[in-house]
Image (cartoon, rainbow, N blue to C red):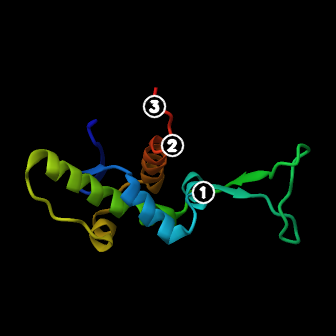
Amino acid sequence: MEQLRRVQIGEVKYPVIITLSVLEKIQEAYGSLHQFEMDIVGLDYHLDGNGHQVLDKNGKPEMVTKEPSIKAIRTAIVPMINEGLEIESEMTGIGYQPVNEQQIDREYNVDYMYLARIIQEEFGKCFAVKK
């Protein structure tokens, strides 16, 4: 198994990974991995004044950018850390204490864009074609 990526939150560098288990938690919270991806990347459909999607000249939906969703960050980061901790524990044989949302909220002292970018990159790995 490849080395786990680490994210620094507070004084601790936590291992993070997105596995099927984490994807399932995200999907349960969002109903759709596609919507989660759009929220974590900061994309939305361009809507007209009546709330209808605006299409480009090729008939594809126009997109608008926005800031990454805090909800998306909060949905993913704790399961990603706990999965990383569990995998690391299995690899080293050393026990671990799972984190919870309150703990991460209290330790959080980094730019939310940093966390969103890491989550985006890890999410992308789930769908990358292996060469």
As shown in the figure, which amino acid type bears the numbered disc 2?
Phe
Query: Residue under circle 1?
Result: 34
Examine the rendered structure and indicate whether residue 1 appears above or below residue 19: above
- Residue pushed farthest top? 131
**Looking at the image, which residue is at 55% across and 58% down?**
33
Disc 1 vs disc 3: Cβ atoms closer than 8 Å?
Answer: no
Find residue 5 and report its image quarter: top left
Look at the image and tell me whether residue 12 can be seen. Answer: no
Find residue 12 and report its image quarter: bottom left
Query: Residue under circle 3?
Result: 130
Q: Which of 60 and 63 is in front in this view?
A: 60
- Residue pushed farthest left? 94
- Judge the density around disc 1: few (<14), some (14-19), many (≥20) Cα neighbours within 10 Å: few
Examine the rendered structure and indicate whether residue 8 appears above or below residue 130: below
Query: Residue under circle 2?
Result: 127
Give coordinates of residue 11: x percent, y percent.
21, 54
Mark 1 or mark 2: name the one nearer the start of the chain.
Answer: 1
- Tag 2, which secondary structure? loop
Mark 1 or mark 3: name the one nearer the start of the chain.
Answer: 1
